[in-house]
Image (cartoon, grey):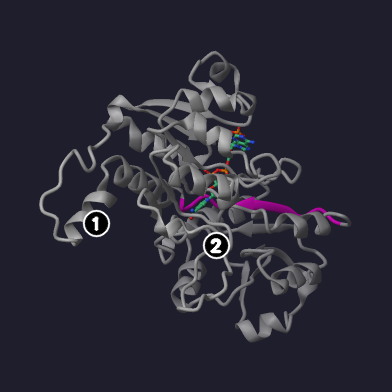
Amino acid sequence: MRVLFIWQVNDQLKSYLSHHPLKKSDTEFIFLPSEQLNKLEIPRPEDIQVVIGWIGHNEVSRNICRKLSNLELIINPGVGIEKALPVMRELNKNKHVTLCNSHAHTYFTAQHALGMLLTLSNCLLTHHRLMKDGKWRAGDKEGASLPLKYRKTGLLGYGPINQQAHQFLSGFKTDIHILKNSLNEDQEADPNFYTPDQLHDFLKNIDNLLIAVPHTKKTEGMIGREELELLGEKGILVNVARGSIVQEEAFYQALKKKTIFAAGSDVWYNYKPDVDEKGRKYPYSYPFHELDNMLLSPHRGGSPLNDLNRWDECMEILSCFENGRELFNVVNLDREY
Ligand SMILES: NC(=O)c1ccc[n+]([C@@H]2O[C@H](COP(=O)([O-])OP(=O)(O)OC[C@H]3O[C@@H](n4cnc5c(N)ncnc54)[C@H](OP(=O)(O)O)[C@@H]3O)[C@@H](O)[C@H]2O)c1
């Protein structure tokens, strides 16, 4: 079995993967320098069955996949595969290639979401700013904490991230409501579970909204003006999924007009922003940084990126493939996640 890594892997990770207990001795890992990858100089491309890496983010990754005539499996070392979908559809026109996700940074992303929720519910942005300005000592008049035990928390999406957030939140005794794509029998019988057609009821019933759904045709723009109004003036929104799930202008206006109380976002609208006249880059078109109820985070949910254990899940998927066991975390190309 030959496995190609489609980015320039650093020495520490190369060593970790090459000595991994799940690596079979007869499996060949191919690590190439970026110049060679960029020129598509891949030795014996027809013998490569597995690719590990992020595909669809640039033309090189797409061209590499096109060149591997006997490719069977792509392991994405993360989630959020909207950029990979067009490549997968193209590859699957004349062969059968499977895409699997790795959810290994779920814990970190859920912790990040909780960090933002707690920062906002305890009005820490306000008090931090007041203390920086030497305004000792502000109190509840400027910003009173909102105890989670008196608030209802809505989990939009119930994949690994929001399931982990649910576990973290259990100690806070906040009432949890969950909206997901489809429900099993037990969930159908539980009034705290909702389907997408019940989005408005879900939003009416909650105070905190944690967004962790994939970016698909159905979730794009699913939170707009009306939905933010339903979340209400005490509502806190935290988005660690993808920027475009929340409509940008409606989001900015809701924060500016205090239609909702506050928001934190780790994900944005334009990942290649132009530099302004003062050398600044903002990944959005509305001035979110001027709002006093907005917590900005530059897509840090997966941090720390050098955590070697996060590669174990990729190795487990590879091991299933090599041993003919059922693959897990397989992306359904029609469902888009
Ligand atoms: N900020 C970061 O650094 C970071 C890190 C990792 C991931 N992410 C983003 O977070 C997203 C969530 O990741 P994840 O690993 O928790 O799960 P995931 O596998 O991407 O999402 C699956 C969950 O979303 C639900 N879902 C799908 N379509 C839906 C819809 N139309 N309405 C409501 N729910 C819907 C699914 O419902 P069912 O259970 O019913 O199928 C499932 O519960 C990823 O797709 C990625 O874009 C961001």
User: Quick one: label 1, few (<14), some, or many (20+) residues within 10 Å?
Assistant: few
Is 244 on the left or on the right of 301, as rendered?
A: right
Q: Nearer the viewer, residue 47 or 283?
A: 283
Quarter of the image where the N terminus is located? bottom right
Q: Which mark is residue 23?
A: 2
User: Quick one: label 2, few (<14), some, or many (20+) residues within 10 Å?
Assistant: some
Cα separation between marks 1 and 2: 51 Å
Helix, strand or loop at label 2? It is loop
* Residue position marked by numbered label 1 in the rendering: 129
Q: Which residue ends up furthest to the front in the rendered image?
A: 257
| Residue displayed at 18% across by 38% down | 140
| In front: label 1 or label 2 | 1
- Range of magenta residues: 95-105
Q: Main secondary structure of the magenta part?
A: loop
Q: Is residue 162 above or below residue 215?
A: above
Which amino acid does the dot numbered 2 rest on? Lys
Quarter of the image where the C terminus is located? top right
Q: Nearer the viewer, residue 26 or 275?
A: 275
